Amino acid sequence: MARRKKQLIFENIEVIDAGARGKTVAKAPDGRVIFLTNTVPGDIVDIRTGKKRKAYFEGTAIKFHKYSDKRTEPVCEHFEHCGGCKWQNMDYKHQLAYKENEVKNNLIRIGHLELPEITPILGCEKTYFYRNKMEFSFSNSRWLTLEEINSEEEIDNRNACGFHISGMWDKILDVSKCHLQEDPSNDIRNFIKNYGIENGLEFYNPREQSGLLRTIMLRISSTGEIMVVIQFFKEDKLKREGLLNALALEFPQITSLQYVINGKGNDTLYDQDIILFKGRDHIFEAMEGLQFKIGPKSFYQTNSTQAYELYKITRNFANLTGNEVVYDFYTGTGTIAQFVAKNAKKVIGVESVPEAIEDAKLNAQLNNIENVEFYAGDMKDVFNNSFIKKHGQPDVIITDPPRDGMHKNVVAKILEISPKRIVYVSCNSATQARDLSLMKDQYNIIKTQAVDMFPQTHHVENVVLLELKGS
């Protein structure tokens, strides 16, 4: 039998900073870092350690001697248990300060970069109810609180519809009200859950891979259109049609009602056939006179209002005059490409997901934009000499890669062809710093600005403008 490692107690420890992945930081008496999940910088606490590593501890505050003046009261009843909004107990102005500081520290510490004066982070006007897309999971074995576990009362209903508990793939927190998506999101989710309970629709069991109701995806666009996609684990036409008809009757404002039958081990929809039940198979987003057709599998920034601000900064940094050839890497559904197209000679977008490229082409036709072209393929394979010969030397490259950043071969090719300007949009300033460090001998950093897309979380976007040295 394995021996359990001894837990340590540290008393009267001040929480000094906010670190990566939303964790806060304290120092143990021996100088080692302690990462915490239930504190705010400025709290003075007693800590019980959990995991112990050579350079750091992970721990939990078990007693608060003093609460930080950076604290605020969380608005959500699920805050302590839901991992979605870990900074809800920190005043928003302090959230912004820590996000901006994290970006700056990553660029300097990881990239060893010389930075100009940093443009202040752009905060979000709406700090709640800002997401246009949410996904919820069903379970017939909902997560129980310690109070429920220790209670002698028998728990009749274990059905849940909500979010996965952090670190517990098979446990779902039952959510009564989520503050991330505007109404009627909560009403729709709760109606589906209650209908399922009242009509004997089995909630999914991830361990046994059984049940009927599996997930809900809800999109509410800035234009007010609503898409609901319900995922069933198996086909039961009578029960399925009963639910969908009841939902359509209760919420006639739903623009697109769709469903999928998915009996495989994971619940991703990208390899599934999604079936239209009522309405359109898409909804529309709008931005500065442009329309974007959004389907169930489409990628679109999940904060519509702040995406507009992010794209304006990107366009401003690109400083286009109408004569430039622009490459837009990791273009997704081509939103940035189309947003800057009127200021460019032509824009070439590349994305690895074929469905996203099809959306991009359709949206360009919808918006009557003729100076954009889109190509599907892995960036490191597509971006080669023949591609450049075909489309011309880019004057500007806009790149918005996934969290892993750009492949080293892509960075090497960019350096080889040396465009005058690069605008690097990133959702992970650590990998952005790594990539920028590879470019610092050839490029100067002219501007950098963080943009908060996700209030109440530690996530932050950052935009950097690079200019070729000597150009």
Image (tube, grey):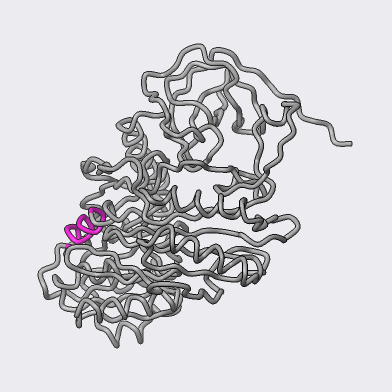
Residue in the foreground of this view, choosing between 195 and 412:
195
Q: Is residue 307 left or right of residue 288?
A: right
Residue sitting at x 53%, y 17%: 45
The image quarter containing residue 212 is: bottom right
Q: Does 8 sit above or below residue 377?
A: above
Q: Is residue 165 left or right of residue 65?
A: right
Q: Does 50 sit above or below residue 382?
A: above
Residue 188 location (% of width, % of height): 45, 53
Residue in the foreground of this view, choosing between 243 and 256:
243
Residue 370 location (% of width, % of height): 20, 83
Question: Does residue 443 show up?
Answer: yes
Q: Does 307 sit above or below residue 299?
A: above
Q: Is the N terminus in the top left, top right, bottom left or bottom right quadrant?
A: top right
Q: Is residue 311 magenta?
A: yes
Residue 399 location (% of width, % of height): 33, 64
Q: How many discs appear?
A: 0
Q: Is the C terminus in the top left, top right, bottom left or bottom right quadrant?
A: bottom left
Question: Does residue 415 show up?
Answer: no
Residue in the foreground of this view, choosing between 406 and 361:
361
Residue 143 location (% of width, % of height): 65, 41
Q: Residue furthest left?
A: 321
Q: Is residue 303 left or right of residue 35?
A: left
Residue sitting at x 49%, y 52%: 189
Residue interval drawn in magenta: 309-318
Q: Main secondary structure of the magenta part?
A: helix
Residue sitting at x 38%, y 80%: 358
